[in-house]
Image (cartoon, rainbow, N blue to C red):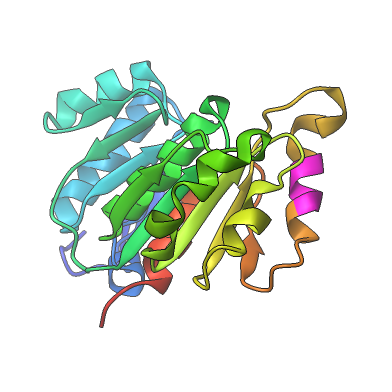
Amino acid sequence: MTQDQPISDLGFARVDHLREARWGLPEAVLGMGKTADQVAQIVARIVERDRGPVLVTRSSVEQYDAVRTLTPQAEWLETPRMIRVAREPVVTAGTVAVVSAGTGDLPVAEEAAVTAETGGATVDRVYDVGVAGLHRVLAEADRLAAADCLVVVAGMEGALPTVVAGLTGAPVVAVPTSIGYGASYDGLAALLGMLNSCAPQVVVVNIDNGFGAGFFAARVTRKR
């Protein structure tokens, strides 16, 4: 393999080095389903070949320990269960407000926030402002209005993204979470509620997909 090849074939994985040029950050690694050694080798190859920060999502402490043996600068982020190799982003994005309904939504919200930061965005975290106490989100209206894009994370009935969209004209990326009681059906109720939002600037990602929301928010606010 030469350094100018777009793909690194590790036998068990083909690492795509063209994603940094297309996305503005290297290929992210999904930890689920991979052994600790596989994750460590993939991360090491990305660090060797690409310039930007590296993320491993849905990872474990065992995977982090293996990554750290090959890439000592890696860090473990406990709340979002992510491994990050922090390097200077190769692009600059705008301001992304990451808004969570409740404390139980923090793992998904932090996954979105860390991903947006990695994608070059400035992130404003506005947490625990769910609609059960509407005054909490109304008190943050100025912060919400200052964002170029918002990621709004909520479980239960998933009402918060529509409320936030009513307070700002910026794009809103709604993230349903699997937090909630029986009839929430592990996030399905929130997903359907968000898909039925009457606010036209709301788009919806899959249940618990903080990575996808954070990436999209950073991408749409990227400054050229």
Q: Is residue 197 magenta?
A: no
Q: Say if residue 209 shows up in the picture.
A: no
Residue at image position (73%, 34%) is 156
Q: Nearer the viewer, residue 7 or 139?
A: 139
Q: Main secondary structure of the magenta part?
A: helix
> Is 126 drawn above or below residue 71 in the view shown?
below
- The residue lying at 25 percent from left, 60 percent from top is 120
Q: Horizontally, is 33 left or right of 189 in the view? A: left
- Between 9 and 17, the one lying in front of the other is 17
| Drawn side of residue 121 relative to residue 107, left or right | left
In depth, the one of 85 and 178 nearer the eye is: 178
- Identified at 18% across, 48% down, the residue is 47
Looking at the image, residue 141 lies above or below residue 18: above
Expressed as whole percent of the image width and height from the top left, the position of residue 205 reads 63, 55
Above or below: residue 38 compared with residue 98:
above
Residue 74 position within the rendered picture, expressed as x and y whole percent measured from the top left: 19, 32
What residue do we see at 69% from left, 68% from top? 199
Farthest right residue?
183
Quarter of the figure that contains the N terminus: bottom left
Residue interval drawn in magenta: 189-193
Q: Quadrant of residue 158?
A: top right
Residue closest to the eye, 141 or 56:
141
Q: Name the quadrant of the C terminus.
A: bottom left
